[in-house]
């Protein structure tokens, strides 16, 4: 009984280590291809990024927040 448990734990530890190494390698490959040298994400989108659009709701928020 105890030998089966030890065998199972060894196999589970090995499988988890292999999975972790594979995940780290895949993550490193993804990061290096999607980031430029200064850490900024490089994309191909032609859309303009809109961070703020003046609306009545925002005016109300800013009046009450101050």
Image: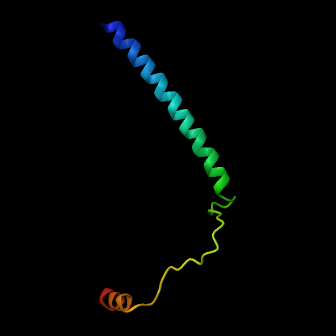
Q: Is residue 36 left or right of residue 6?
A: right
Q: Is residue 44 left or right of residue 12?
A: right
Which image quarter holds the C terminus?
Answer: bottom left
Work out whether 51 lies above or below 45. Answer: below
Q: Residue at x 56, y 35 (%)?
A: 22
Which image quarter holds the N terminus?
Answer: top left
According to the image, what is the colour scheme of the structure? rainbow
- In the rendered image, residue 54, in percent from the top left (x then y), is placed at 45, 90
Q: Is residue 43 left or right of residue 50?
A: right
Q: Residue at x 64, y 45 (%)?
A: 29
Q: Quadrant of residue 34?
A: bottom right
Work out whether 11 lies above or below 40. Answer: above
Q: Residue at x 45, y 18 (%)?
A: 11
| Count of numbered circles in the view | 0
Q: Residue at x 66, y 51 (%)?
A: 32
- In the rendered image, residue 30, in percent from the top left (x then y), is placed at 61, 49
Q: Is residue 22 left or right of residue 16?
A: right
- In the rendered image, residue 65, in percent from the top left (x then y), is placed at 32, 86
- In the rendered image, residue 38, in percent from the top left (x then y), is placed at 67, 61
């Amino acid at each position: 009984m105890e030998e089966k448990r030890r065998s199972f734990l060894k196999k589970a530890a090995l499988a988890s280590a292999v999975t972790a190494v594979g995940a780290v390698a895949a993550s490193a490959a993804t990061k290096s291809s999607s980031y430029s040298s200064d850490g900024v994400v490089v994309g191909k989108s032609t859309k303009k990024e809109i961070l703020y659009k003046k609306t009545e709701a925002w005016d109300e928020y800013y009046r009450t927040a101050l």
